[in-house]
Image (cartoon, rainbow, N blue to C red):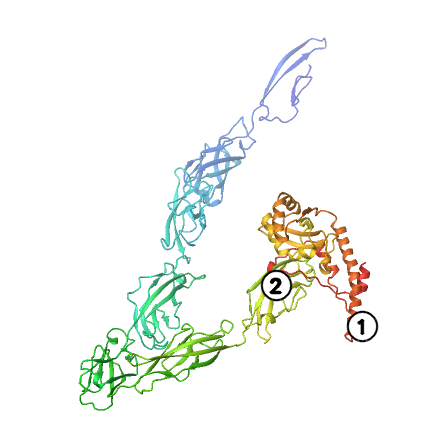
Amino acid sequence: MRPSAPDEFEVRDDGNIRLKQRLNYDSTQQYIFTVQAKDVGGLSDITTVTITVEDFDNLNPYFDHSLYEASIEENQVGQFSDVTPEAIKAQDGDTGINEPVVYSIKAVFPNEYQSNFEIDESSGVISVTSALDREEIDQITVHIQATQQDDASKTANAVVSVTIEDVNDNPPKFDQDEYTVSILENSPQDQFVLQTRVTDLDLGGFSKGHFIMDSDTFIINSQGVISLRSDATLDRETVDNYNIEVIAVDQPVDGLSSTAQVIITVLDVNDNNPQFLPLPEPIEIQEGVYTPSSPGEVCKILVTDADIGDNGRVTITTYSHTELFRFREDGTLLAIEELDRETQDVYDVVIVAMDHAVPQRNNITTVRVSITDVNDNAPVFSSDTYSKSILVKDAKVGEVLLTLSATDKDAGSNALISYRFSEVSSMVALDAETGDITLTSDLSGVIEDTLLNLTAIATDHGTPPESDEAEILIYFKIAPFTESVAFESSSYNFTIKENEPEASIVGKVRALTGNPVVMVRYNMKSNKDVFSVDGEGSIKALRPLDKEEEEWYILTVEAIDSRTPPNTAETMVSVQVENVNEAPVFDAEIYKAEIFSISPYKFPIVKVQASDPDVGESSELQYSLQESTTLLDVEPNTGQIYVLDASSFGGNLFTFHAKATDKHGLSTTTTVQIEVKQSVHRDSVSVISLNQPVYIVEKMIPEMEESMEKVLGWTVKILSVRAEDGNEMRTILRESTDKTYVSFIAMDSSGAVIKATEVKVKLDTEHKVLKSELESVFGPGLEIKVEDSSGNSEVQADTITLGVLLVIIGVTSASIIIYLVKKKKNGTDPDTPSLNVGIGLSKRRRSIDSPANFNINPESREVKYHASFPQDEVNNRL
């Protein structure tokens, strides 16, 4: 036989089939193979062998999967809505026998949820018996077991991971039921107010939620931020509090919601001025003596302020007449000093209502306080004595001899006056209303000169009444007499010191009448605005006098007697104003100037000028600086401030004080502000040449600048003036030259320096106009040339310096000789010569090489050069 069996079997020669290894039913349930039988003669036969493997109960049950995933909505009971990868199933591992299995739940994690699940023993279907809450737990693990029904020892285990699916069963929740916040009423639009916070226990939280808020003033965004609307403004005085309901909805459709209250308090900003309520009318107070400790109440002023707190707390104060009036805390206006209606009957008191905020706001109004009258003034007769002379033979009954006149400073009934005699007279009568004294007797009993002496009383109608008395003298003459008035002197000479106070007495004049009953009054007939004369003849100055304004006054004083008709006389009064030394006065309170740091030594900056009010003494003023500085100094006699050394002061503003002192030691000061600027670039310096001598051009610098400014339309500052060969020393030597170079800069209205190239273009364009303008300064025949300022300025400067030095050598030699001669003539030692030749080369050269800008009053500008150095230094420089 030819074996052809599987590996598990062996076919022997004797025809027996032998099992070589264990068989596994689960792997192969049947084997089919062929067996061949063959004899020695070569004949054979084939047969098919079929071996069926019978199952043996040796395997445990098994689940199709070790892990199942299932889900169920929260709050639901019943079977899982979805099980993956497939429905739970377990079977006997011995498929041939396939004993049924029983399902059970072995454990649930967390174990407190054990009772929430049950499993069908036969189908393995798991159900939820008690609803689950995803917000409490969202994942539960259920361990299940399949047990072979006939053999409890044979089991299989699997795990079911249960996901609790979310259901929108929780409304959103604000972190506060009520939000309270404050915001200033002047907050800008879109101002942040507060952040609300919302949570939602459902899956995804509040990520799909939105807010609802009904407000015209505030808006809420999707993040819960509440802010001021872009088109809204807050005014606490209109609305001081907002109570807004905010709704949070967790999803767009069928969403759950919750609400919170937002209380927004608008804080006050001091944006309202205090306001006065209508003032009482009239506002009056009686005249009288009041003091701070015993004031008089005028009225109560009411003020409101729409703001609150200190912003709305208002205090009222007086701004005018503070010495007379003040306010009490309750707003009552008080009088605190004596008020005299006769001195002033109305006060316009400026009052200020001011809140207590920082900064404060205020309101101002004027309160008119009328002072009512109190009968505190007695009538006053116009004269202490009234007199009249009358010839008896001319007297007529009923004739008005005198008219009395009295005045009362009070008002109303307090000023009404009645007249009477202190005792009744048989010769005259006094009208109570008019004050007329009339003759009531024919005087037949008067046979000699008789003087009637009466006392008249003027009484007002006040309570209590006040009165005044006057003497009445009536002279009854039998025979006529000569009547005249004359001054004791035909002229008077008086002196008064200047600046004496108002009403100072100058002197006294006196006129005589020759009659004891005739009175004299005086009248100033000239210079009435300066002097007055009273009833006693005392002459007074109406104001302080100034000798520098007027030294002599010639007055005419008139004397008028009380006769009818009156007699008059005049006298001349000479008044001399005596001098009193007065301090000088500067023309300006502050002088300002600008220079560049390259400004040369002795270059004039600005001229301070003071005048002495004392006659003829302005030229004797001496000028000095109060501060000690190496930047500048001042000429004592002229007030010209000039540069000492500005090289180290660039880019700064300095304030000094100049003093003017008169010969008596009185002085005054003024402020001088000097701005030292850094040097400008030489590309900004322009140069023109004129066919004029240097010293002439130097004198005309202010006029040149003004003329050039008219033509160019820019501010022009001349920096240097030099001769044709570059020598600025010709100013000193006064040598004539045919050509003078003028270096200058031009600045626009902002102070920026214009480049020389731009200036040159304009000079060329406006050449004819410029020539015409400058001819008005220098005269006809002027030639102007615009020079190229871009050349080798270093070479030019060196050339200029060398030329200056050559001139200085000649001048120095001559100066030394002249000096020695003078010294010898003066009897001094000639071995110690002093050289002062006019210019400091190293410093002066900088004004040529580098441009400078000087803002100087043309009227005060002076060009001076000065230097002093020994001969060997000149030689070294050469």
Q: Which mark is residue 607?
A: 2
* 330 shown above or below 207: below
- The residue where tag 1 is placed is 830
Label placed on residue 466? none
Of residues 730 and 676, the one nearer the viewer is: 730
Image quarter where the C terminus lies is: bottom right
563 sits left or right of 255 in the view: left
| Category of crowding for the residue at label 1, using alpha-carbon neighbours closer than 10 angstroms: few (below 14), some (14–19), many (at least 20) | some
The location of residue 646, given as percent across then percent down, is: 68, 61
Label 2 secondary element: strand
The residues bearing labels 2 and 1 have C-alpha atoms spaced at a distance of 38 Å
> Tag 2: Cα neighbours inside 10 Å, few (<14), some, or many (≥20)?
many
In the image, is 759 to the left or to the right of 812? left
**Which one is nearer the viewer's eye here, 370 or 742?**
742
Which residue sits at x=32%, y=76%?
A: 288
Residue 464 visible? The answer is no
Residue 656 picture location, percent across and down: 61, 66
Mark 2: amino acid? Lys
- Identify which amino acid the numbered label 1 is placed on: Pro
